[in-house]
Amino acid sequence: MWQAAGDSNFLLVGSELLLLETLVKPIQAGDNELEQIFRQLLLTSAEVQLYPISLPVLEQAIRLRASLNLKSPDAIHAATALSLGCTLFLTNDKVFNRITNLPVTILHQALSE
């Protein structure tokens, strides 16, 4: 996936919420190397673009959370992907299958096929 993105076949996008979700554990563990790897990957990599949690994204996340009983972070990630018109939503969390208009691929299932 990273190789294909690096070859400019596609862009990896996500919510700025990814920073919160990826940096907490390395910081708690005092793992400065892993923290810097995640920061470089998410903030300076040409293959990755993070988008802010805007009011329209929050409005869509509210509706997803209310109608599908999603956790707030999951609803924000899904709303971000939907607002950007993503053609693939790669995850290991089957909860995203509840969102019928989101093109979800479960990573561990795809790798086992």
Image (cartoon, rainbow, N blue to C red):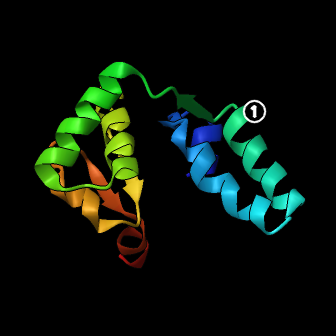
Residue 34: quarter of image: bottom right
Q: Which residue is drawn at 33% across and 30% down?
A: 58
Number of numbered callouts drawn: 1
- Asked whether, in this view, residue 2 is left or right of residue 71, the answer is right
The residue depicted at 29 percent of the width and 67 percent of the height is 94
- Where is 72 relative to 60, above or below? below
Front residue of this view, candidates 66 and 44: 66
Instruction: Give x and y (percent) for residue 35.
Output: 79, 54
Which of 57/113 is in front? 57
On screen, residue 63 above or below 99: above
Measuring from the top left, give residue 20's x and y in whole percent.
60, 47
- Classed neighbour count for the residue bearing mark 1: other residues with Cα under 10 Å, few (<14), some (14–19), many (≥20): few
Q: Which amino acid does label 1 sit on?
A: Thr
The residue lying furthest to the bottom in this view is: 112
> Is 84 displayed left or right of 25 in the figure?
left
Which quarter of the rendering shows the C terminus? bottom left
> In the rendered image, is residue 38 in sight?
yes
Q: Nearer the viewer, residue 105 or 74?
A: 74
Left or right of residue 42, residue 110 in this image: left
Quadrant of the image occupied by residue 88: top left
Q: Residue shown at 37%/34% (left/top)?
A: 80
Give residue 82's quadrant in the image.
top left
Residue 57 in the image: state x and y as whole percent: 33, 27
Residue bearing the label numbered 1: 44
Determine whether the residue tagged by mark 1 lies in a helix, strand or loop.
helix
Q: Can residue 89 be seen in this view?
A: no
Q: Where is residue 111 in the image (x, y as percent from the top left)?
A: 43, 72
Q: Which residue lies furthest to the top in this view?
A: 55
